[in-house]
Amino acid sequence: MITTRHIYIGSDHAGYALKQYLLDAFKEKNFIDCGVYSDQLSNYALVAHDVALKVKNEPKSVGIIICGTGIGVSIAANRHPGIRAALCHNVDTAKTARLHNDANILALGARIVDEKTAFNCVKIFLDTPFEGGRHEERVSSIDYYGEKP
Ligand code: RB5
């Protein structure tokens, strides 16, 4: 189990129902709901930026972001240095995202995964620690694609 300070969750309208399902399914974890708060049309990038900034400013926290495909939210969240948002479609990718990539945000596509798969992805994501070792340098290279500072 990673030491999670806070778990931030957000979605656009397409991910709203799945977000509500996950809030209920994991209610003992007290996820912090960053919206949206209805299925009215909304902008996936705005909620992705909000969750990404919260996670970035609180190093041990993690995020869950959901849109129709998971693609829009992951692209937006990954614009933030220090954010490693992993778009996962099954338990294997969610687990490896933690083990190898030290992902701090899980991105899900509500039109791609069913509730059970999403539940299992969230569970393994929260329960799996970063493996470290040979992955340390690779992960620390993600934000330094030019010369190292
Ligand atoms: C909304 O229709 C959809 O475009 C959005 O949820 C997401 O899939 C974008 O990547």
Image (spheres, rainbow, N blue to C red):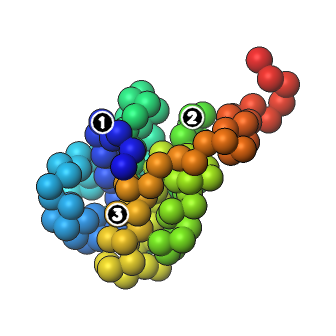
Task: Answer above or below: position of 53 versus 110.
Answer: above
Q: Residue furthest front?
A: 133
Name the front one of labels 2 and 3.
Answer: 3
Report x, y in % for residue 134.
72, 44
Mark 3, other Cα within 10 Å: few <14 / some 14–19 / many ≥20:
some
The residue under the point 16% across, 65% down is 24
User: Vertical placement of 62 versus 57: above or below?
Assistant: below
User: Which residue is tagged 1?
Assistant: 5
Who comes first in sequence, dot 2 or dot 3? 2
The yes-or-no answer for disc 2 within 8 Å of ligand 1 is no
Give the structural element (helix, strand or loop) at label 3. helix
As measured in the structure, the alpha-carbon distance from the residue carrying label 1 to the one carrying label 2 is: 17 Å
Tell me the number on the disc at residue 139: none
- Measured as percent of width and height from the top left, residue 62 is found at 39, 44
Which residue is under mark 3? 123
**Residue 98 visible to the viewer:** yes
Q: What is the x, y in percent for residue 43?
A: 41, 56
Q: Quadrant of residue 23?
A: bottom left
Q: Residue visible at 50% across and 64% down?
A: 94
Dot 2 alpha-carbon crowd within 10 angstroms: few under 14, some 14 to 19, many 20 or more:
many
At label 1, the amino acid type is Arg
